[in-house]
Image (cartoon, grey):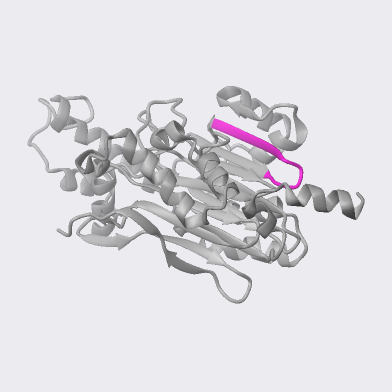
Amino acid sequence: MRRRDWLAMNAALPLAARAAQAGSKDLVISSANGLKACAKAMEVLKAGGDTLEAAVAGVTLVEDDPNDTSVGYGGLPNEEGVVELDASVMHGPTRRAGSVAAVRNIKNVARLAKLVMEQTDHIMLVGEGALRFARAWGIEETNLLTERARMAWIAWKQSLRGREGNNNWTDGLDSPRMLKAAERLRRQFPQAGEELIAWALDVAANPPTGTINLLALNARGEISGVTTTSGLAWKIPGRVGDSPIIGAGLYVDQDVGAAGSTGRGEENIRIAGAHTIVEMMRQGMAPREACLEALKRIARNFRNDAEVLNRFDINFYALRKDGAYGAASLWDGRQRRGYRADIQFAVNDGTGPSRLEKCANLLERKRP
């Protein structure tokens, strides 16, 4: 391309896109559960690896971690006790995407989504079709339900008694005496400590919406992203949230930047959150403010009713091509099991270990 033509094209770009060409650098951001993932992704970038290769390598660590019950192996199951995973990837340089949804028995679904992008003419494969595709490529199948996740599922099944009357999963007429929920778990899982039992009961009562979104940028200004999840705990089998939906759980535009989300997927799908954020950045809005704008649209869908909005959490993350980044959450904190936690996100800029930074927030929860 002749310089005159390049200048003409560049002048037509929106402000954010022009700024993005000026000062790119190696940078990775993710949801708060991605400290190690960001470090791994940065390692790949520094070795000269592709941005999507880096992003997928990072989240694979989380997918492999049985202690993260919102992603991959160890993820909390659906209402039938079966773990179903979703993931999406987008590669900025080639402007391609791939995703999978409602996948069983495949641990690293981010890699599977990348395979869909690279080896098919499709963007999304779901359910049995996605599993057959994985088998065709020789991907090993794994029982994704860990004992920890199974205990939480059992606690949830037994908790249905209080809402729906007697059921076959709780003490019934043949039981010698009624047992409290914690005591039932102690008998069924004698090796579990009190902290684990308390966690299982809390998860049963308050199903979490986890997920990891990771966005990676290199010094050449190339940007990619990935989102992977086990979805909402105790969901109806086949339920798919925002994570594998291009434009909702993840969106990358090589001219501008990338965005992604964690939290309640249904509300993100309604506003095409990731795409909305990237478009706001295209018009010159800073990443943090773009994330807040997406949250305002979610709140507006509920007429800004704080009582209704208090029933869920959702977070957005944004990375612009020039290295500007930001994140925002619907609420300023999360109340769980007697303690309050700030909403944070992970950052690695290549100068040291990954760190956590506080998300901006749209609303403030009342202190207990």
**Residue at x 76%, y 43% (from the top left corner):** 94
The image quarter in which residue 174 lies: top left
Nearer to us in this view, 153 or 9: 9
Q: Residue furthest bottom?
A: 352
The span picked out in magenta is: 91-101
Q: Residue 337 location, x and y as percent?
A: 22, 56
Does residue 99 show up magenta in the picture? yes
Q: Residue 159 location, x and y as percent?
A: 20, 36
Nearer to us in this view, 312 or 166: 312
- Can residue 274 be seen in this snapshot? yes
Quadrant containing the C terminus is bottom left
**Residue at x 28%, y 34% (from the top left corner):** 302
Q: 123 left or right of 118?
A: left
Q: Residue 187 location, x and y as percent?
A: 22, 46
Question: Compared to 131, does 322 lie above or below?
Answer: below
Q: Residue 49 location, x and y as percent?
A: 76, 59
Q: 230 left or right of 180?
A: right
- Can residue 66 be seen in this snapshot? no
The image quarter in which residue 170 lies: top left
Question: Compared to 368, does 229 lie above or below?
Answer: above
